[in-house]
Image: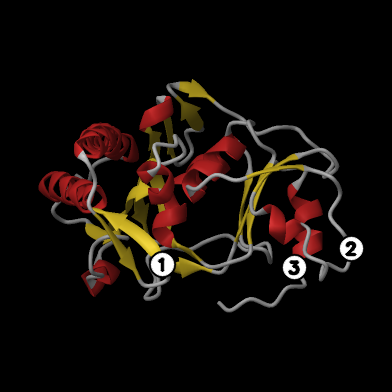
């Protein structure tokens, strides 16, 4: 009998906490930093936590596939019904600079949809979790998004320069716009009502989104692309066109402002 999503979640959480401790230990020793294409940093801790998670999950669930930012893509995953989708350190720049907004993100995706997910932020002691149909939790307590109904004055996680760009047909109203390095953490902040929405009009990889997508939707938030489409994971190209994660009453207002934008699939 296959493990249940709840059993998979227990595995995800235990491994994420272990990976977080390893990341903190390695940073305290001093990091080795390299740069990937696109001027994106990667550290020895990214690789070490990736290895820890891949080894742990592979031993426990040898029949599951694997997709991670720091592992060469093995297309064998396309033939597995269940796949681990992992970002061993999401928010590496924050991690390198000893800022708290980085996480370990891990999900189990079944038939293209996440069924269990954890986003663990070690420096702030926050463990966000969800299983399909079971609601979303922060440190064991159920969470819900905000009930915000207006863009004016809302809390938005994103790039302030995007909102003030002169090309918008209708200028955005005054909002509290703040940045967080980790995409998954931004989404969890929306899921828990600490912010009202997160918007990114650029492509996001599956490992950026899968765990937090489940957490946000189970909490009751909208999560999908700027055209109002939900996500399907573990495709040949494991990426999504854009990100809109918002309180349910705010999401239609955001989608009305962005659905005209043509982005590559």
Query: What x and y, as percent, mark residue 61?
Result: 17, 48
Q: Looking at this view, name the residue that lies furthest to the front.
A: 30
Tell which tag, 3 or 2, sits nearer the viewer: 2
Q: Which mark is residue 170?
A: 2
218 left or right, relative to 99: right
Q: Looking at this view, name the residue that lies furthest to the right.
A: 170
Quadrant location of the N terminus in the rendered image: top left
Q: Which mark is residue 39?
A: 1
Query: What x and y, as percent, mark residue 122?
Result: 36, 31
Query: Residue at horizontal 13%, vertical 53%?
Result: 62
**Residue 117 visible in the shown view:** no
Among the two numbered marks 1 and 3 on one chain, the one whose residue lies closer to the N terminus: 1
Query: What x and y, as percent, mark residue 74?
Result: 22, 70
Tell which tag, 2 or 1, sits nearer the viewer: 1
Tell which tag, 1 or 3, sits nearer the viewer: 1
Give SS at disc 1.
Answer: loop
Q: Which mark is residue 259?
A: 3
Query: Residue at horizontal 84%, vertical 45%?
Result: 174
Report, in whole angstroms, how far the alpha carbon at label 2 lies from the one at label 1: 33 Å
Disc 3 residue crowd, few under 14, some 14–19, many 20+, Cα 10 Å: few
212 left or right, relative to 175: left
- Asked whether disc 1 touches disc 3, contact meaning CB atoms under 8 Å apart, the reply is no
Among the two numbered marks 3 and 2 on one chain, the one whose residue lies closer to the N terminus: 2
Give SS at disc 3.
Answer: loop
Report, in whole angstroms, how far the alpha carbon at label 3 lies from the one at label 2: 13 Å
Q: Is residue 54 above or below residue 128?
A: below
Report, in whole angstroms, how far the alpha carbon at label 1 lies from the one at label 3: 29 Å
**Residue 125 visible in the shown view:** yes
Disc 1 residue crowd, few under 14, some 14–19, many 20+, Cα 10 Å: few
Q: Which mark is residue 195?
A: none
Q: Is residue 176 above or below residue 258?
A: above
């Amino acid at each position: 009998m296959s493990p249940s999503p709840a059993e998979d979640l227990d595995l995800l959480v235990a491994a994420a906490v272990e990976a977080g401790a390893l990341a903190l230990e390695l940073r305290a020793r001093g990091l080795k930093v390299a740069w990937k294409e696109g001027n994106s940093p990667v550290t020895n801790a990214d690789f070490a936590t990736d290895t820890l998670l891949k080894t742990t999950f592979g031993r426990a669930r040898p029949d599951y596939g694997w997709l991670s930012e720091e592992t060469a893509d093995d297309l064998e995953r396309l033939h597995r019904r269940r796949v681990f989708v992992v970002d061993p350190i999401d928010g590496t720049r924050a991690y390198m600079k000893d800022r708290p907004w980085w996480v370990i993100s891990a999900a189990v995706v079944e038939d293209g949809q996440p069924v269990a997910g954890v986003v663990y932020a070690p420096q702030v002691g926050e463990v966000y979790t969800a299983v399909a149909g079971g609601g979303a939790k922060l440190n064991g307590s159920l969470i819900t998004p905000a009930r915000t109904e207006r863009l004016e004055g809302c809390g938005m996680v994103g790039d302030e320069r995007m909102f003030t760009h002169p090309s918008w047909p209708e200028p955005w109203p005054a909002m509290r716009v703040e940045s967080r390095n980790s995409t998954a953490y931004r989404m969890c902040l929306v899921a828990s009502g600490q912010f009202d929405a997160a918007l990114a009009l650029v492509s996001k990889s599956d490992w950026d989104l899968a765990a937090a997508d489940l957490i946000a939707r189970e909490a009751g938030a909208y999560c999908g692309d700027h055209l109002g489409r939900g996500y399907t994971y573990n495709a040949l190209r494991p990426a999504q066109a854009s990100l809109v994660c918002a309180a349910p009453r705010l999401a239609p207002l955001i989608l009305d402002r962005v659905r005209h934008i043509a982005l590559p699939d």
